[in-house]
C-alpha cells in the first residue's frame, strides 16, 4: 500500500460504475466533483455511483466537492473563437455583448470600474496577455502584448487588481447547499484570498453537524500574502498551481509549493498538490519523464495527496494515470524510507497538546521498536491526522466506528481508515484489533504494534493512551478503561 493519497477528478471519461470501480481498484482515495462543469443532477448521479462502488468494495473513499468560486470568464464570442495579435487594441465593455476582435465582455461586467490603467488582463491561463491603456465608464481599452486565440468562456485573470467581490457566488451557495445535503466529505473553496473567505463558507455549514471539512485552494497573490492565517483557518490546503502560475511569475511556483507544504506540515494540516501532474496522459498512455519527476518532487515536499484533473475527467487513460501515480509513489516512498530522517511533530505549533504529545510518542516508539504498524482509535480523525505528518515508514490504521470519519481519514498520508466498533474494555479492544489484523493479513501473531486510544470513549479530544502490544497476546478478561 502506498501512503501518498490519490485524488481523481470525475468527468465523462470516468463517471460510469465500471470506470469508478477501476479507479478505486487502481488506488484512488478521494473522488473530486468539479462544480465548474456539469449540473447538480449530473453530480447527484455520479455521487450515488461513487458511494455505491465504495460500499460494494468496502473502501471508505472520500468525496470532495470543488466550488467554482468567482472565476471571471469571457462571454460568448462570434463563432466561439477569434484570434488577436500583438499590437491590436480590444475593448472590455460593461454589460454583455457577443464578442469579436474589437470588443468582448465578461460574466462580471463591474470589473470595468475596478481595473486601472497599466494593469494586466490575462486570458486563457495567460496565453493571451492584454494591458489596460485607457479607462472609460463603460469600457477598458486594452493593448494586446501577447496574441493568441480567445474563445467563449475562457478564464480571465487580473493579477494586479483587487476586485471587490464575494468569495462565494450565488452558484457556489447553491452548490454548497447541495453538497451539504448529500453529505460530501470535503468542500474545496476556490480563489481564497484571506481567512475571512473561509469563515464566510463555514457560516453556511450546519452547526449541528461536524461532517464536512474545508479545503482552501491557494491560487491568488492575496492568498500568498495571507498564507499563515489561511492555513490556520482551513482543514486542508490545496496548491492550485494552474491559476497560481498565471497570477505570479511561473518560476516562483515550485518554491511556493515547497513553502506551503512546509508550513502545512508544521501546522499539522494535510496539503494537496494539484494541476498538470500527468498532463500528457490526457492523450498519451504514459507520462513524460518531467511529469514523473514532478510527482516525485511533490512527494519529497511531503504532500499528503496528489490530484489528477483532466487526466481522469476527460483524458483517454484515466485508470492508467492513477496506476502511474501509484508506481511513482511506491518508488519515491521506498527511497524516502531508506534515506529521509525521521520527521517529528512541531509540538509548539499544533494544538491540542495531549493528543499531539501522544502522537509524537507513538512516532518515536514505532520507529525505535520497528513496530509492524500503528493502530489509532479516533472519534474525529484528528489524532490520525497528526500522526500522518510524522511520515512513519509503517502502516497507520485509523480505527473509528463512524463511516464519515473513516472517509475523512482517506485524505491523510499513510493512514488506512477502517470502520470498527470500539469496546470500552482494553483487552476486548485489543482482541478486536488482533482479529482485524489477522483477518486482513496486515500482521502475524507475535508482531509488535503500537496502539493509540482514549480513556473517554465518546469525548472528542480524549486521546491519551499509548499501548505497546504483541498481536495475539490479549487474554480474556481484564480491567475496564475508565475516565
Image: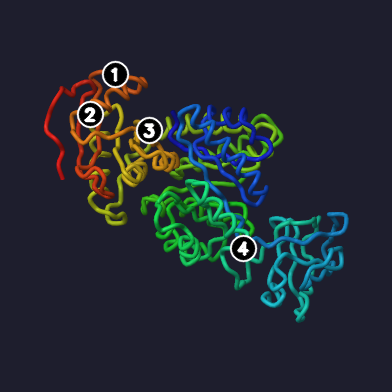
| Disc on the earlier residue, 4 or 3 | 4
Q: Distance between the Cα atoms at labels 3 and 1?
A: 18 Å
In the rendered image, the quadrant that contains the N terminus is top left
Which mark is on residue 444?
Answer: 1
- In the picture of the structure, the residue carrying the numbered disc 4 is 170
- Residue 324 position, x and y percent, is 57, 31
Q: Would you place residue 306 above or below residue 331 in this image?
A: below
Callouts 4 and 2 close, C-beta under 8 Å: no
Q: Is residue 142 visible?
A: no
Label 3 vs 2, first from the N-terminus: 3
**Picture residue at 37% right of the left edge, 34% below the top:** 419
CA gap, disc 1 and disc 4 = 55 Å
> Residue 250 at what x, y percent from top left?
61, 55
Packing grade of label 3 (10 A; few <14, some 14-19, many >=20) is: many
Of discs 3 and 1, which sits in the foreground? 3
The residue to which callout 2 is attached is: 430
Q: Are marks 1 and 4 in contact (CB under 8 Å)?
A: no
**Is tag 4's residue or tag 2's residue first in the polypeptide sequence?**
4
* Closest to the observer, 303 or 48: 48
Residue that mark 3 sits on: 418
Q: Earlier in the sequence, mark 3 or mark 1?
A: 3
Tell me the quarter of the picture where residue 396 sits.
Answer: top left
From the viewer's side, name the closer residue of 259 and 195: 195
Amino acid at each position: 500500500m502506498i501512503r501518498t493519497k490519490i485524488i481523481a477528478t470525475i468527468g465523462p471519461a470516468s463517471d460510469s460504475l465500471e470506470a469508478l470501480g477501476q479507479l478505486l481498484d487502481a488506488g484512488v482515495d478521494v473522488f473530486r466533483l468539479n462544480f465548474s462543469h456539469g449540473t447538480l443532477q449530473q453530480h447527484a448521479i455520479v455521487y450515488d455511483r461513487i458511494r455505491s462502488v465504495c460500499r460494494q468494495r468496502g473502501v471508505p473513499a472520500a468525496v470532495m466537492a470543488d466550488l467554482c468560486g468567482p472565476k471571471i470568464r469571457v462571454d460568448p464570442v462570434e463563432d466561439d473563437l477569434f484570434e488577436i495579435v500583438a499590437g491590436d487594441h480590444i475593448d472590455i465593455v460593461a454589460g454583455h455583448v457577443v464578442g469579436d476582435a474589437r470588443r468582448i465582455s465578461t460574466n462580471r461586467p463591474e470589473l470595468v470600474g475596478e481595473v486601472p490603467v497599466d494593469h494586466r488582463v490575462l486570458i486563457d491561463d495567460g496565453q493571451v496577455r492584454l494591458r489596460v491603456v485607457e479607462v472609460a465608464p463603460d469600457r477598458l481599452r486594452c493593448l494586446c502584448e501577447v496574441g493568441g486565440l480567445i474563445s467563449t468562456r475562457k478564464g480571465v485573470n487580473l493579477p494586479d487588481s483587487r476586485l471587490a467581490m464575494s468569495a462565494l457566488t450565488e452558484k457556489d451557495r447553491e452548490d454548497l447547499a447541495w453538497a451539504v445535503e448529500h453529505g460530501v466529505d470535503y468542500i474545496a473553496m476556490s480563489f481564497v484570498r484571506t481567512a475571512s473567505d473561509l469563515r464566510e463558507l463555514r457560516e453556511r455549514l450546519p452547526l449541528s453537524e461536524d461532517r464536512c471539512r474545508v479545503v482552501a485552494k491557494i491560487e491568488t497573490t492575496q492568498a500568498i500574502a495571507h498564507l499563515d492565517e489561511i492555513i490556520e483557518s482551513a482543514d486542508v490546503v490545496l496548491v492550485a498551481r494552474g491559476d497560481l502560475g498565471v497570477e505570479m511569475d511561473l518560476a516562483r511556483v515550485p518554491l511556493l509549493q515547497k513553502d506551503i507544504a512546509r508550513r502545512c506540515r508544521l501546522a499539522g494540516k494535510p496539503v494537496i498538490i494539484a494541476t498538470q501532474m500527468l498532463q500528457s496522459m490526457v492523450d498519451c498512455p504514459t507520462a513524460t519523464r518531467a511529469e514523473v519527476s514532478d510527482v516525485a518532487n511533490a512527494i519529497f515536499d511531503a504532500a499528503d495527496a496528489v490530484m489528477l484533473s483532466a487526466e481522469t475527467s476527460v483524458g483517454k487513460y484515466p485508470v492508467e494515470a492513477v496506476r502511474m501515480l501509484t508506481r511513482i509513489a511506491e518508488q519515491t516512498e521506498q527511497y524516502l524510507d531508506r534515506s529521509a530522517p525521521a520527521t517529528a511533530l512541531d509540538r509548539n505549533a499544533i494544538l491540542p497538546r495531549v493528543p499531539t504529545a501522544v502522537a509524537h510518542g507513538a512516532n518515536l516508539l514505532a520507529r525505535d521498536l520497528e513496530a509492524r504498524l500503528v493502530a489509532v482509535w479516533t472519534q474525529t480523525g484528528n489524532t490520525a491526522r497528526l500522526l500522518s505528518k510524522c511520515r512513519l515508514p509503517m502502516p497507520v490504521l485509523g480505527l473509528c466506528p463512524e463511516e464519515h470519519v473513516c472517509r475523512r481519514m482517506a485524505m491523510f498520508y499513510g493512514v488506512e481508515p477502517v470502520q470498527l466498533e470500539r469496546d470500552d474494555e482494553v483487552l476486548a479492544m485489543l482482541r478486536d484489533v488482533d482479529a482485524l489484523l489477522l483477518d486482513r493479513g496486515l500482521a502475524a501473531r507475535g508482531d509488535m504494534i503500537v496502539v493509540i486510544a482514549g480513556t473517554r470513549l465518546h469525548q472528542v479530544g480524549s486521546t491519551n493512551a499509548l499501548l505497546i502490544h504483541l498481536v495475539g497476546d490479549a487474554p480474556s478478561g481484564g480491567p475496564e478503561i475508565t475516565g
